[in-house]
Image: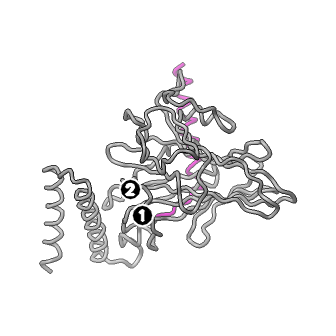
Amino acid sequence: MKKNIIFINLMLLMLQSLAVLGAAEFSEGRVKLVLNENTGRFSLYYLTDIKKERYQSFFVDKDPRTSFVSILVDDKSYRLGDSTAFRIKVQNEGSKPAIVFESAALEVVQEFEFIRIGGSTLANGVKMTIRVTNRGEKSIPVGIRFVLDTALGENTPNHFYTDKQQVSAELALTSKDSDSFWVSKNDTLGFMGSIVTAESARPDLVHFANWKRLNDASWKVSPSNGRNFNLLPYSIGDSAVAYYYDPVAIPRGGVRSVSVLLGLASENGFETVGKSVEGDISQLLGTAPGTGTDELSLRTDLIMLGDVINKIDAILTSQQGVSDEDLAALESILAKLKEKHVSR
């Protein structure tokens, strides 16, 4: 038994190592995007510690294959990255990184664009667009599914919340519901996903459920509102969110496109979304070749000052006061910045 456990652990380590191979990294502002050409999956991270360049994953990244895109063509489901019917490549055209899946009949492009949410001065999210192009000779009905293996809220009573409700158990939202975004959050980081965007059709179904239930289904799993996030005996408290766009006929040469916004949680959701400033984190922090230590220090201080301003704005908006600890921290940061720059 012990040998079996050791063997399984070794296999998991090998799979994780293989997943790293073929990975391309793209960073902008406080977001890092990793696209893996071998698995056809992506991971998304937020820069929680600027000076140490320490990132935290927005969702499960130990095995990125637990999140995926699949399409339904003539009632047959294809999980992109796993299906041998599609070739995979990573591209970066026009500063929009993408994973491209190609077959004789279809091309599916999963494209990403860095965005700024909630008035942030730096990129803190991405816009993910899935485009399906019909390369065949006739019209084809195509459905789109996106399953995201969330994790931040799994140690709390409410694994998710939306702008309308707390989500402590399985929940299916249809086009009749008015929820516009969801949040998965722990004590240090909040991750947010859109349900409604101005640039894309609303999904026909957004399903919060046990990850294994969603993963094991070839397409949709029958919703059971109020069911817990367990699937005994092994999958306990493991939640995920799935987007479903029902099949729509794509004519010959036609394109179907849907978009989802993902990023740092904001109380106002995606009310304020802007394009990211150009430049990756090395440029923003001044660590690119040719950047002097004085410029590095100044850029880092500017980012820190922006964070302080955002924190003060959040305190004023909440009208709930500020703790002595938070106040002392803010005063300390501002005092150090003043001492460093005003005395020059």
Assess disc 2: are there few (<14), some (14-19) or many (≥20) residues with their C-alpha within 10 Å of its C-alpha.
few
Which residue appears farthest toward the top when viewing the image? 1
Tell me which secondary structure the magenta stretch mostly adopts: helix
Quadrant, the C terminus? bottom left
* Residue at which label 2 appears: 268
For the point 63% across and 65% down, which residue is it? 91
Residue 21 in the magenta stretch? The answer is yes
Please report contact status of discs 1 and 2: CB closer than 8 Å, yes or no.
yes
Give the x, y percent position of residue 189.
36, 49
Q: Which residues are magenta?
A: 1-27
* Residue at which label 1 appears: 272
For the point 15% across and 72% down, which residue is it? 338
Give the x, y percent position of residue 194.
50, 53
Tell me if I can see residue 67 in this picture: no
Vertical arrangement, residue 91 with respect to residue 149, above or below: below
Corner quadrant of residue 156:
top left
Which residue appears farthest toward the front when viewing the image? 176
Q: Amino acid at mark 1?
A: Thr
Residue 168 in the magenta stretch? The answer is no
Q: Secondary structure at mark 2?
A: loop
Give the x, y percent position of residue 94.
59, 73
